[in-house]
Image (cartoon, rainbow, N blue to C red):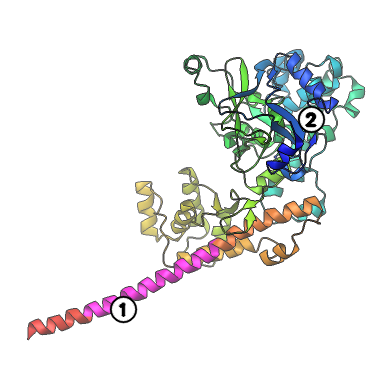
Amino acid sequence: IEISTLIACGQQEPKPLFIGFESFMEGFVDWFQSHGAHLDTSAVGIFTFPLSEGGRGAVALKDIPEGHTLFSIPRNMTLSTRTSQLPERFGLNAWQKAGLHKGWTGLILCMMWEQANGSSSRWQGYLDTLPNKFDTPMFWGEDDLAELKGTSVVEKLGKADAELDYTTKLVPAVKSRSDLFPPDDLLTHYTLDMYHIMGSRILSRSFVVEKWNGDEDEDDDAAGNVGNTSLGSAMDVDDRDQGQGSEHAEEEEEDGDDEDVDDSSDVAMVPMADLLNARYQTENAKLFYEKDVLKMVSTKPIKSGEQIWNTYGDLPNAELLRRYGHVDILPLPSGESGNPGDVVEIKADLIVAVLSSNEQAAKGDQAKERIDWWLEEGGEDIFMLDYDFDLPPAMVSFTKLMLLPAKEWEKVQEKSKPPKPKLGGILYDIMISAIEARISEYETTLEADKASLSDSLPLNKRQALIVRIGEKDILHGHLKNLKSLKEADSDQQKGGSNKRKADSSNTSSKGKKSRR
Ligand SMILES: C[S@@+](CC[C@H](N)C(=O)[O-])C[C@H]1O[C@@H](n2cnc3c(N)ncnc32)[C@H](O)[C@@H]1O
């Protein structure tokens, strides 16, 4: 491929990494092909882009039509607790007893073990290509983390929980089997640092590879209907990730009552597929699965020189930063730039706190009774605000529930129906106060943040600033919207009451007339 083609396609000049240029990635491609995988080398190249373009990523070497298989990987080449030999060698009962079947600790241990085994591991050619350094907040110092105050990133890091898993599950397992884990390796291959590196590799690169579910899918396959068997990825489908907030969170879910908990042995590292970068609504390729292989297939025509993008699920910047260490910056409808997928979380607790000074609102045990009912009915305890600037209906409904007079609260319980999420009356002021309270959780103002944003800032500070600006932009947009809705509503009321006055004077004059 001509570098000029890439530049013509709007990319800054990339540094070629493979296809005759870079032995390191050539070695990986050789490993990939020699283990039964296939890469269409006439269509796909691996290049390094500027960091803003994703760093190392895949490029179309020619025009690629939609539905083209870019590469395919046998299932047994993915790295998971199903494919690594370690759980069996450890003993499946012992594995479970050690708690390694839950969460990511088991997969982290498999990855450490495979890496420690060097050239005798089937995955050495792959593991050698994985990053050892991450820009994710998990590795930030206190100073940089302070920049994220007000966002939900810090409380979702789960660093302490991950470290607890390391000391209570992984270390005892390693120490219990010196035949599998030579004692000296504890200080090199099985360290806490390595635990975090492996956890971050999983967080930013793993896919969910469900077990092949015979019958129905075989029909799809027979019909060549690969599109219906779309494979979600850690990057792609959030169903798994929504609850999987950290290296540890999946386990928390498993320990809880959640029935939709995913099987942690579905979590798999997929060589080559994890080389694709992602950007908001730019996806042009996706991983599909069949009985024995996974296939990366183009979902749109891709022009020669264009980057091949997977999707990480069009996540908000806070989540992109936490999981992947980057943020998306695109034009917004307002003319400014940011991530159109950004959201702000408002906890139900904050609404309750705002209502504490409202005479009408339920308090103490009564408030608790309503909150318990709301949660039992499946209500959310965190509300998501986005760039639509429509308040989440559940947030309005929950607030109304807390404000209901006792009689109406009884009716709600009888009917098992929460209040309709319609704004009006004092709700405007309560919602405005809630959003103002949320804004006050950040240390700095939106104006100050915008003024301090510059390309010369250190990466962590700059990315944290972009996360904060996006969230505050949403909050201020909601404030503005609520204030104008409140004004329009009161104008309408006034208009209505003027109209009513006019109507009543008409009526009375008519009445008078008729009386005459
Ligand atoms: C699945 S890997 C993609 C391949 C990766 N670039 C590599 O060199 O191996 C995900 C990582 O790629 C980087 N990345 C992906 N998309 C990006 C983007 N739009 N902007 C910046 N970095 C991106 C982030 O570092 C992220 O953690």
Q: What stretch is highlighted in magenta?
A: 478-504
268 sits to left or right of 220: right
| Rendered view: 130 above or below 215 | below
396 sits to left or right of 62: left
Is 170 or 487 nearer to us in this picture?
Answer: 487
Task: Find residue 320 and report its image quarter.
Answer: top right
Q: Outermost residue toward the left?
A: 516
Q: Where is residue 110 in the image (x, y as percent from the top left)?
A: 76, 22
Amino acid on which the number 2 mark rests in the picture: Leu
Residue at point 79% right, 40% down? 134
Classify mark 2 as within 8 Å of ligand 1 or not, answering yes or no: yes
| Rendered view: 475 above or below 13 | below
Amino acid on which the number 1 mark rests in the picture: Asn
Q: Could you tell me if the residues under marks 1 and 2 are in contact, i.e. CB atoms within 8 Å?
A: no
Where disc 2 sits, the SS reads: loop
Residue of label 1: 498
Q: Outermost residue toward the bottom?
A: 516
Badge 2: residue crowd in 10 Å (few <14, some 14–19, many ≥20): some
Task: Find residue 304 and report its image quarter.
Answer: top right
Q: Position of residue 225 (x, y in %)?
A: 49, 21
Residue at point 47% right, 54% down? 398
Residue at point 60% right, 53% down? 344
Picture quarter with ligand 1: top right
